[in-house]
Image (cartoon, coloured by chain):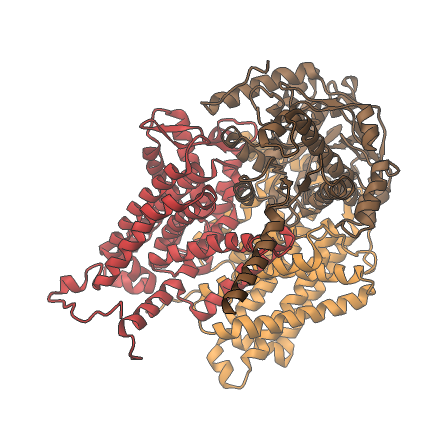
């Protein structure tokens, strides 16, 4: 009898484990952060990502008939935790979604050894666009240099010549990322670039930075902010009466909740974006039907109408499309990480495909190749109207002729510093 | 029974003062060393190396450095992480300026730089004491991290401001950088940490160690019996910062592979302080016990729900983790303020006289 | 170079006096908040020799509880009262669970225990309230949100009304606290315990009651700080880092002195802002506020090891 109970217990334990491992599924972990000073901006994105995958699992039974296991591993935006998550998940994972420029930089050199693609949509190291050097890393659909270039283009060269542009940024790899491009453009166009760093400890108290802005009287403020820094900067800008329409943020500084703090006073604030919420898109209806109505979402109605939630959807769409392309190419539903790399290198998100996905207008069309891991989709300028972000520009495109040589140069420097570093020919 | 000391006679003071007065201690240490050098490397997976074995050793070494200063010499420091940073950046500059340099030599030399900085920031300890000194060490902490951020020469004018460990070879084997194998890195770390531990045990049992302890217990009394306080305090800062600097170089070169300045910010300092205090101030063994608890516990807690099949969101696990660490710190402080090392001492005494209660 | 250090900053100051005033005002407002946190430290340190690192997280915890309760539909002022209740429960549990078993332990052990409390409260707070940035309920509490604009010497000086309110409330709190400590029985008991614990205990002052009381007062101060600071930049766990700024204030002012905490806080708030604007940003690349206060305090301590207002350290063997 005792023997029997022990067997039964073992069987029960096995069954629990079995549901986790034996069933056919693809393991696509997300190194999320729902804690810490950056959680405020992280949560809506993570919710969007998660809901898209939940919807695919519920509606289509996953991708190509295989369920997606979209488990989250909490990093708290800490690089150390991120690496721990990476080590923990890399055994079965088909993709790494590092979710922080710091973690991306840390995982990047290991990608050639571990051979798992890194998917960092809209963040990470801009030269990752060079697929010949960074064979395993993807920052689809647009890089930080794209963002900087589009912002300057939106302001317009004639408005920049001889002017002063303050570059308010988080003092962190993320914030410093666009500096090489900005410096180059400043020299080319002839405007004065004034970098103003915000330390991690000063995110919520930026009065020194804004006093500097008041003294220097820049004509524009370009902001590279994240987490608690955004709300801090926007409230200070309102306080010092900096004209809001002269302030432009990167896509991570365009979170609805940050602007809601100042409401009407934030009118005119702009943020570049490669995504836009289309609330009546067919996809949103599916999310409502398969995820929200089933009570499977962690989000709420207000958040789901925001820019960041829909960006989370777009990010998961990129991964899902990569998996789908890879499955078709490999001829099997259960793809390997290197199959997925092929898939992400051969994405072709056309208007027609977006319409099929029910995401028309949520992201510009783009295409990746072996040599181009970014796709350079371009983006839209969004403006805060006091209640929500509105699209105020046509599709902007980054200046490829300026960015491409810089990417190639920095990528080559990276490869040289990390000898031996394999470089593919991309034939 | 296993720890019966009957029959082990000491016939001289020297024998009584030996490192292992009881034979079983030596045997136990031997067993642990066999595990560390042979069994773990054979059995461990990549995950175990990267999240448990290597970090535990490095954290234990950093805590040992802090323990020399705080536990033996009585100077409370909250700036450990910044001195680790000095070691790491010094090592990075050396291997990028002189690529021919043997990586292990570079790591050992990098401690010299942090020792220098440590002495400079140790000078105020001659006048400032207790909590005032602890806050003064925070000046080092915040100033140095700021310097890592602003002094672009330190990170070779890299656009991201982060340092990246290049692939470093030694006798045809990669020991650092992305190409290096975890097993090799583990052995390098283990070797350095073992040597440092031996050094520390000998130092703390010798003249210098006794000088430090006298300074810690009552510094004025120590001065009155002829101990040069300046020499005692500054050597403590020097030795401590050297070890901490080497730990910092190992931290980045043998484990993390890349570092940004705020990695060396105050949470890391606190983490090492936890290890030293939970392990036991004024003990060498304690650093290892503390590191096992503080580094190992969150990893185990993090994998537990998945292993048991309990569906909890990973963010919840992380929150509970933070709470648990906080609660455990309080718990251990209450049950044994002298740390895990003292707990082991008590257990050992019980074992020696077992089965008799007294 | 010398010109940049010794001449240019002062020329700047005189050229734009309105801007100088604005800098000083911003410094004063941060200084008030540093002083409030430091006050929490000092109260606890005086009565129990505990260096309470958890003061920073108590600020966050109080502010989060207040906003969380309000979001649940509780009227603003009721939330304030309930939050005070929560801070009281917190004070009692800290005393009962953590401090009582640790009575008589070395300072560093008690200090570590408060770091343990900090971690515990961070985890607990994130479980209950989530990690999102929350908006302080400034309007519901009746705090004015406009700003007063002066134009001295044809320049521009903007004073936020909520900052003025914060300065006013902080001032009243300090006065109330001083009255309480000097004029009431309980207050005198707290001071007695700080001066000579043995003697205080022998005349029948209850250690437990006083500790609960002191932690509760620290909780009230935390709530005020949380509201004032939260109104400036929202409430989130990132607020916790301002607790570090209180440490150099303590060094400068002395660990036992209430006056020291206030003057030290104001001094550091204004000096670090001046240094950052006129020397840090032009010469050193900015962000000097992270370390300036510590280095300043360190230099002062080299000359006065007990701080500007601390009790003279007398050492005996």
**For this view, does C116 lie left or right of residue B67?**
right
Kindly give the residue lying farthest to the right in the view shown: A280
Q: Position of residue A172 (x, y in %)?
A: 59, 36
Kindly give the residue lying farthest to the bottom in the view shown: C203
* Residue appearing at x 53%, y 27% in the figure: B158
State which chain is coloured orange.
Answer: C
* Residue appearing at x 57%, y 17% in the figure: A409
State which chain is coloured red.
Answer: B
Is C284 located above or below residue B115 in the figure?
Answer: above
Q: Position of residue C254 (x, y in %)?
A: 52, 61
**For this view, does A238 lie left or right of residue B87?**
right
Q: Position of residue C310 (x, y in %)?
A: 50, 63
Is C53 located above or below residue A359 in the figure?
Answer: below
Of residues C66 and B329, which is closer to you in this image? B329
Q: Is residue C300 visible?
A: no
Q: Quadrant of the C terminus of chain B?
A: bottom left
Of residues C9 and C261, which is closer to you in this image? C261
Colour of chain A, in one word, is: brown
Q: Quadrant of the N terminus of chain B?
A: bottom left
Q: Is residue A269 visible?
A: yes
């Amino acid at each position: 009898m005792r023997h029997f109970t022990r067997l039964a217990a073992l069987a029960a334990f096995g069954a629990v484990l079995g549901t986790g491992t034996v069933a056919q599924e693809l393991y696509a972990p997300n190194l999320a952060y729902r804690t810490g000073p950056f959680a405020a901006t992280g949560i809506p994105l993570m919710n969007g990502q998660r809901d898209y995958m939940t919807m695919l699992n519920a509606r289509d039974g996953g991708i190509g008939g295989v369920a997606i296991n979209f488990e989250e591993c909490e990093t708290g935006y800490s690089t150390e935790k991120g690496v721990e998550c990476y080590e923990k998940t890399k055994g079965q994972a088909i993709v790494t979604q590092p979710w922080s420029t710091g973690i991306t930089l840390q995982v990047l050199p290991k990608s050639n050894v571990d051979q798992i693609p890194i998917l960092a949509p809209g963040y990470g190291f801009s030269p990752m666009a060079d697929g010949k050097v960074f064979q395993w890393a993807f920052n689809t659909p647009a890089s930080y240099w794209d963002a900087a270039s589009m912002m300057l283009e939106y302001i317009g060269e004639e408005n920049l010549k001889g002017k002063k542009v303050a570059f308010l940024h988080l003092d962190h790899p993320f914030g410093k990322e666009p500096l090489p491009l900005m410096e180059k453009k400043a020299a080319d166009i002839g405007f004065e670039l004034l970098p103003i760093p915000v330390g991690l400890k000063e995110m919520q108290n930026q009065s020194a930075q804004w006093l500097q802005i008041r003294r220097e009287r820049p004509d524009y403020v370009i902001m590279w902010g994240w987490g608690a820094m955004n709300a801090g900067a926007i409230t200070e800008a309102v306080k010092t009466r900096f004209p809001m329409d002269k302030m432009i943020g990167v896509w991570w500084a365009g979170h609805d909740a940050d602007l809601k703090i100042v409401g009407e006073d934030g009118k005119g604030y702009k943020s570049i974006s490669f995504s836009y919420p289309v609330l009546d898109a067919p996809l949103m209806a599916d999310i409502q039907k398969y995820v929200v109505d089933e009570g499977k979402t962690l989000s709420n109605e207000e958040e789901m109408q925001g820019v960041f939630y829909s960006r989370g959807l777009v990010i998961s769409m990129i991964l899902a499309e990569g998996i789908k392309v890879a499955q078709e190419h490999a001829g099997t539903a259960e793809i390997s990480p290197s199959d997925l790399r092929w898939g992400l290198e051969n994405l072709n998100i056309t208007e027609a495909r977006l319409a099929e996905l029910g995401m028309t207008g949520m992201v510009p069309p783009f295409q990746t190749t072996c040599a181009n891991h970014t796709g350079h989709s371009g983006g839209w300028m969004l403006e805060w109207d006091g209640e929500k972000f509105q699209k105020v520009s046509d599709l902007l495109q980054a200046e490829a002729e300026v960015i491409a040589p810089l990417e190639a140069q920095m990528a080559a420097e990276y490869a040289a510093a990390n000898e031996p570093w394999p470089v593919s020919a991309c034939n | 029974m296993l720890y019966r000391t009957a029959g082990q006679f000491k016939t001289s003071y020297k024998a009584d003062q030996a490192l292992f007065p009881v034979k079983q201690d030596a045997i136990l240490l031997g067993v642990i060393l066999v595990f560390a050098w042979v069994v773990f490397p054979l059995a461990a997976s990549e995950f175990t190396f990267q999240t448990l074995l290597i970090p535990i050793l490095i954290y234990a070494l950093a805590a040992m450095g802090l323990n020399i200063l705080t536990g033996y010499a009585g100077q409370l420091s909250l700036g450990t992480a910044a001195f680790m940073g000095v070691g790491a950046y010094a090592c990075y500059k050396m291997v990028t300026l002189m690529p021919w340099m043997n990586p292990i030599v570079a790591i050992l030399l990098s401690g010299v730089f942090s020792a220098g900085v440590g002495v400079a920031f140790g000078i105020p300890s001659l006048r400032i004491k207790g909590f005032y000194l602890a806050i003064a060490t925070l000046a080092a902490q915040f100033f140095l991290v700021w310097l890592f951020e602003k002094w672009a020469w330190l990170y070779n004018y890299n656009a991201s401001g982060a340092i990246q460990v290049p692939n470093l070879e030694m006798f045809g084997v990669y020991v650092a950088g992305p190409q290096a194998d975890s097993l090799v890195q583990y052995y390098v770390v283990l070797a350095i940490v073992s040597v440092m531990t031996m050094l520390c045990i000998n130092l703390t049992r010798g003249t210098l160690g006794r000088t430090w302890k006298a300074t810690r217990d009552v510094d004025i009394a120590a001065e009155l019996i002829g101990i040069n306080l300046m020499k005692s305090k500054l050597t403590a800062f020097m030795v401590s910062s050297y070890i901490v600097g080497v730990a910092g170089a190992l931290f980045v070169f043998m484990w993390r592979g890349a570092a940004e300045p705020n990695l060396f910010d105050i949470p890391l300092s606190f983490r090492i302080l936890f290890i030293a205090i939970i392990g036991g101030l004024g003990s060498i063994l304690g650093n290892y016990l503390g590191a096992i608890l503080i580094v190992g516990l969150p990893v185990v807690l993090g994998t537990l729900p998945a292993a048991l099949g309990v569906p909890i969101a990973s963010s919840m696990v992380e929150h509970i983790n933070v709470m648990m660490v906080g609660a455990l710190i309080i718990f251990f402080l209450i049950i044994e303020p002298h740390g895990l090392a003292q707990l082991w001492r008590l257990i050992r005494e019980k074992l020696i006289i077992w089965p008799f209660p007294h | 170079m010398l010109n940049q250090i010794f001449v240019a900053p002062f020329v700047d100051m005189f050229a734009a006096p309105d801007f100088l005033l604005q800098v000083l005002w911003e410094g004063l407002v941060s200084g008030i908040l540093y002083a409030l946190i430091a006050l929490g430290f000092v109260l606890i340190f005086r009565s129990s020799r505990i260096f309470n690192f958890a003061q920073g997280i108590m600020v966050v915890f109080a502010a989060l509880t207040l906003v969380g309760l309000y979001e649940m539909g509780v009227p603003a002022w009721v939330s304030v009262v309930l939050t005070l209740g929560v801070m009281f429960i917190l004070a009692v549990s800290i005393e009962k669970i953590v401090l009582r078993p640790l009575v008589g332990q070395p300072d560093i052990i008690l200090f570590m225990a408060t770091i343990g409390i900090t971690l515990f409260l961070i985890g607990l707070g994130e479980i209950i309230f989530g990690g999102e940035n929350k908006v302080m309920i400034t309007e519901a509490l009746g705090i004015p949100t406009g700003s007063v604009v002066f134009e001295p010497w044809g320049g521009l000086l903007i004073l936020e009304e909520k900052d003025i309110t914060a300065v006013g409330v902080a001032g009243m709190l300090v006065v109330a606290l001083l009255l309480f400590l000097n004029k009431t029985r309980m207050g005198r008991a707290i001071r007695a315990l700080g001066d000579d614990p043995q003697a205080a205990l022998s005349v029948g002052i209850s250690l437990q009651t006083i500790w609960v009381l002191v932690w509760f007062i620290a909780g009230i101060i935390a709530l005020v700080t949380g509201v004032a600071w939260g109104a400036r930049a929202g409430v989130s766990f990132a607020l916790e880092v301002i607790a570090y700024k209180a440490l150099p204030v303590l060094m400068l002012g002395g660990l036992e002195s209430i006056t020291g905490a206030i003057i030290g806080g104001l001094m550091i708030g204004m000096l670090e802002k001046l240094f950052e604007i006129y020397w840090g940003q032009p010469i050193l690349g900015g962000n000097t506020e992270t370390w300036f206060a510590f280095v300043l305090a360190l230099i002062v301590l080299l000359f006065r090891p007990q701080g500007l207002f601390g009790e003279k350290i007398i050492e005996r063997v």
